Image (spheres, coloured by chain):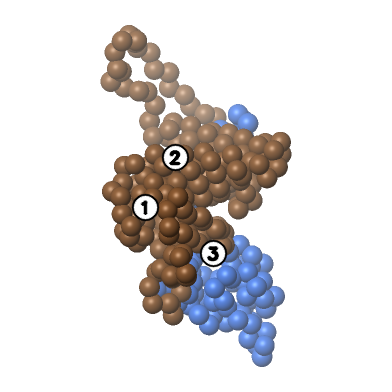
Amino acid sequence: MEIEREEIKGTFKPELIPKETGGDIDDYEEALHVLMKFVGSMSSALEQVSGRGASAVVYQAGRRMGHEAGKLMEKTDDLEKAMDELSEILGIEFYFEMWKPADQDGYTIEKGDETIVKLLFMDCVVRQTLRRTGLPQKGPLCYLLYGYMVGAVEEVMGIKGKLDIDHVGPNACLKTLTIKWGGK
Amino acid sequence: MVEIEVDEDACVGCGSCVEDCPNDVYELDEEKGKTKVVKEEDCMACLSCHEICPSQAMEHREIHVAKRLYIDRKVSNVLDKMI
């Protein structure tokens, strides 16, 4: 397929913020796809070089991002409220909801000093990246979101948390978030 | 609520969806040798059953369809040349 390119010529002074950044939405989409490919390849290479350590590296990166995002959120000890806020911050690219089987009363389950909630991730950039690159789901890159959720929950609620991947699918992934009461 | 339809003419009764579904939405009807939907209300629309079904016999209605930007053909063509 022949790609048509329109060359834009103009004057640019470094001290000015350009009015036009150049390119349209298609260019951004193209650039994002290239990035997806790169990130996918990087994750795959990381796994090849460091084995299971790759997941730990990606997890830490996600956790750090989660802590940063958590700083923008209101502190709460209500898990459902924290999830609602987090859902707003993650936005449409990581669209998730709390999920429960039909015969379960509430979304949260109390188990000793732990509270458990199931999260259903419907839209996910990580999943798109993996499928874009032809990589299997549940690999190191999925730990990015794992770390992100844990980091955000730790920051907002001031407690320890962990996220387990229950099931991955092409349209949605089910994860279990467990938080342990009793401080860090 | 999610509505699931299994095309009985297409279903080969392999039971892959029954095994793969994490919420036991499907069961194998031993008499007919076909999949039947038994817990539609517990379907979370992950669509693993769509992916595993060899005869594409499933249809899910009223679900959130996740974005699939990676399918864009124009972009794929550009990428093929680059990478």
> Which residue appears at 45% of the width and 50% of the height?
A184
Task: Sort mark 3 into few (<14), some (14-19) or many (20+) by Cα contacts within 10 Å.
Answer: many
Classify A6 as above or below A95: above
From the image, tell me which residue sits under label 1. Answer: A157
Q: Position of residue B57 (x, y in %)?
A: 59, 71
Q: In the drawing, what numbered circle is on residue B47?
A: 3
Asked whether A163 or B50 is in front, the reply is A163
Are dots 3 and 1 in contact, CB under 8 Å? no
In whole angstroms, how far apart are the C-alphas of marks 3 and 2? 29 Å
Numbered disc 2: what chain? Answer: A
> Which residue appears at 38% of the width and 13% of the height?
A9
Numbered disc 1: what chain? Answer: A
> Which residue appears at 46% of the width and 74% of the height?
A101
In whole angstroms, how far apart are the C-alphas of marks 2 and 1? 16 Å
Q: Taking B14 as reference, is A179 left or right? A: left
> Chain B appears in which tint?
blue
Classify B35 as above or below A142: below
> Chain A appears in which tint?
brown
Look at label 1 and name its amino acid.
Met
